[in-house]
Image: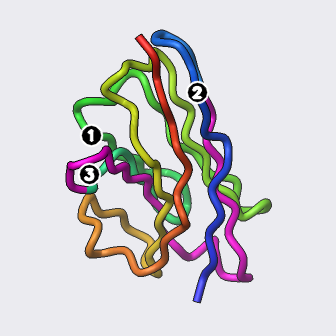
């Protein structure tokens, strides 16, 4: 079982930037596709971005396209989410997830490894 630990959340003003990191344990991380999801209070968990095991394929939710960038460094077993142009509606707990397949998915149920989450708060 892969263990995932997120970091990099915090409080930022609207228009600002944050970079989230997700460090994975386990020697086979390079064979896992990864994704970022978020959950705001009173709302369901929603897809943010995903990246294939090789990093060649990425996918984004329409709400973050053009503002967020997902990337990975398999040598460091880490996935990143660069968030630019943050808006108050981006406020949520952000979760890193991984699945033992090379291809990505926007569906949370397709991921069986999850981190504990990191809070991102964007003030107006």
Q: Nearer the viewer, mark 2 or mark 1?
A: 2
Instruction: Name the residue that disc number 1 marks.
Output: 61
Q: CA distance from mark 3 to mark 2?
A: 20 Å
Q: Pick the residue in front: 8 or 108.
A: 8
User: Disc 3 vs disc 2: Cβ atoms closer than 8 Å?
Assistant: no
| Earlier-in-chain disc, 3 versus 1 | 3
Q: Position of residue 19 (x, y in %)?
A: 63, 34
Q: Quadrant of the N terminus?
A: bottom right
Which residue was labeled with disc 3? 46
Magenta span contains residue 38: yes
Quickly name the residue at label 2: 11
Q: Position of residue 104 (x, y in %)?
A: 36, 63
Structural crowding at the residue carrying mark 1, measured as other residues with C-alpha within 10 Å and reported as few (<14), some (14–19) or many (≥20): some
**Residue at coordinates 42% horizontally, 22% vertically from top-left?**
67
Instruction: Judge depth for marks 3 and 1 and give the one in front.
Output: 3
Residue 68 lies left or right of residue 16; in this view the side is left
* Residue 80 location (% of width, % of height): 61, 46
Task: Specify the farthest residue to the right.
Answer: 76
**Residue at point 38% right, 53% down?**
37
């Amino acid at each position: 079982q892969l263990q995932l630990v997120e970091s990099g959340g915090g409080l930022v003003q609207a228009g600002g930037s944050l970079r989230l990191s997700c460090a994975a344990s386990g020697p086979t991380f390079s064979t896992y596709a990864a994704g970022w999801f978020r959950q705001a209070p009173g709302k369901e968990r929603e897809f943010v971005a995903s990246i294939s095991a090789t990093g060649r394929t990425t996918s984004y939710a329409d709400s973050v396209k053009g503002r967020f960038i997902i990337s990975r460094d398999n040598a460091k077993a880490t996935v990143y989410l660069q968030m630019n142009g943050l808006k108050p509606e981006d406020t949520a707990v952000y979760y890193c997830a991984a699945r033992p397949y090379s291809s990505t998915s926007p569906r949370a149920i397709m991921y069986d490894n999850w981190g504990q989450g990191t809070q991102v708060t964007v003030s107006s």
